[in-house]
Image (cartoon, rainbow, N blue to C red):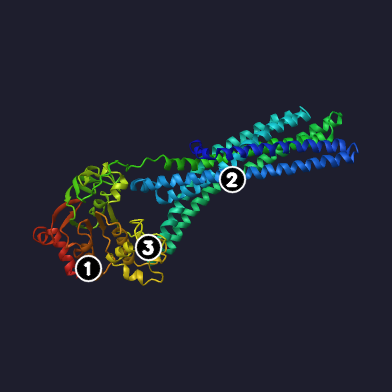
Amino acid sequence: MRKLFRYLKPYWLIALMSPLLMIGEVVIDLLQPDLMSDIVNIGIFGGDMNFIVSTGLKMLALVVFGGFFGIACSYTATSASQKFGKDLRVDAYSKVMALSAEQTDKFTTGSLVTRLSNDITMVQEVVSMLLRMLVRAPIFFAGGIIMALSQNVNFGLVLIVSLPLMVLLIILIMRKATPMFMKVQTKLDKVNSVVRENVGGARVVKAYVRERAENARFGDANADLMQMNIRVQRIMALTNPIIMIIMNLSVCAIIFIGGKEAEAQRMMPGDIMAAITYTTMILSSVMMIGNSFIFISRASASAKRINEVLESTPVICDGGARPEECGGKIEFRNVSFAYPGASGKAVLSNIDLTVGAGETVAVIGATGCGKSTLAALIPRFYDAVEGEVLVDGVNVKDYDLDSLRSRIGYVMQKSELFSDTVANNILWGKSDATFEEIREAAKIAQADDFVSAMPDGYDTYIAEKGASLSGGQKQRLSIARAMVRKPKILILDDSTSALDLETEARLRKALREALADTTVILIAQRIASVRTADRIAVLENGSIIACDSHDKLMESCAVYRDIYNSQTKGGDAQ
């Protein structure tokens, strides 16, 4: 928690006002029992109605002032905590966006969503509580003891017995409950992960009639969360009843001691009433402190998870190089790569490949042979374990990431569109593109016809993840997004798989005309998609076994011929 309090520094003034205002409210609350004691002792027993009225009006005025202080304290505490939460959420989100793919995979998406939402909200609520309770409980405690003892020092005997019992109870509950709070958040991660997977993959769930199975999976995760929460709440539920028992026994002891003192004419009834109220205040303040520590323990579990994100150092870091010219030449020099946690099994082994500026090189091979991984090393989604990847003779690790990635248009296997207009989705490629540039990119991608036929054209709003579009439409808009950038390097990672052969043929022709000076890395499964490339690299088991034109590969590469023949017999190659 201490590490996160730095987010309160910009709002120190309003954060400081909250406890100061609380002091005013607490002081007024501490004065009320003493005034009530005077009303009983002087006004009622003395038969002085004027004193009762004047003191009552004084108490009423103090209540108004106390209410003002309380409202102002709540406002300032809420304002400071909300601003604290906003800044913390922005920093945590920025850190998540800066993490590499392997780090995001390690945290899991569901866990990151929980940390950015539930965990930060938990810490934010505790900050608001502390700004109010940090002063209220200690002043109530100290002030209550002073005021109670001022009535009669014998009341201290009650406090000597009751206070240690309450403190011991709170310590025992905290020791038992604190480790469980982390488990609760972990269970919540699982629930969020299941929800995210099934909402995002709803069509697959329905297509395979998996509703019952996925409902059961969610039910199991939800039941685990419920059981863990019940275990925590069972422990927490013991707190208030036991504290109330201690509190009521203390009141009984005060009444007993006070009755003896009154019988001996050393105390008035009003003083006993005040002592009971002050004792209740003291014990309530201890309960407040105990509850605060319990909430702090829970928030500490959340704070730890947030700090894990904030303190994560991105594995992929800027190199700083910003070459002004970009020809588009790509080189792989003895490159090997294995995914973290993959038991050292190499996905790519000893890759040597040079792609000249303006050249189109296709990569083909069996599923899982490393085609997409090879492409992902160019914009540094991952770093090679061995060897070097160079762009225009500069190792990609030496590039400034923005400078490197701004030169590349990347169309991935899975088309990622956002809940926004068609035009704004294409503008992701170039934020300052004109409408003419947007439409030209869409024409090259063979998307202009279907976009223009939409009710609002390029201003048509796309549903989340492009749910309102077909697979082929999403792929073409993704290609348009890359084309509007006019990249020097274009990577098409199996990005035409949902297109029919006629549309794909028109797209390839438009790309050849528009990308005369652009280096193209084309990854595909179909021979028809790659046969017109300048060269075709054949990947098998993570190694390039051949790289040449279609005609020469048909003569020299048995693996390529097998792929061609299998597709030709199936009628796929044209």
Task: For marks 2 and 1, give the CA distance.
Answer: 60 Å
Q: Residue 374's spot in the image, x, y percent?
A: 24, 51
| Residue located beneath label 1 in the image | 505
Q: Is residue 209 left or right of residue 127?
A: left
Q: Residues within 10 Å of mark 1 (few under 14, many from 20)?
A: some
Earlier in the chain: of badge 2 and badge 1, it is: 2
Q: Is the residue marked by circle 3 packed among few (<14), some (14-19), or many (20+) residues within 10 Å?
A: many
Give the secondary structure at mark 1.
Answer: helix
N-term-proximal mark, 3 vs 1: 3
| Amino acid on which the number 1 mark rests in the picture | Ala
x%, y% of residue 36? 80, 38
Tell me where residue 104 appears, x and y as whole percent.
37, 48
Q: Quadrant of residue 367?
A: bottom left
Name the residue tied to disc 3: 423
Q: Which sits earlier in the primary sequence, circle 2 or circle 3?
A: 2
Residue under pointer 2: 78
Instruction: Point out which mark residue 515 bears.
Output: none
Distance from label 2 to label 3 (Cα)?
Answer: 40 Å
Q: Please name the residue shown 50% across and 51% down the image.
A: 225
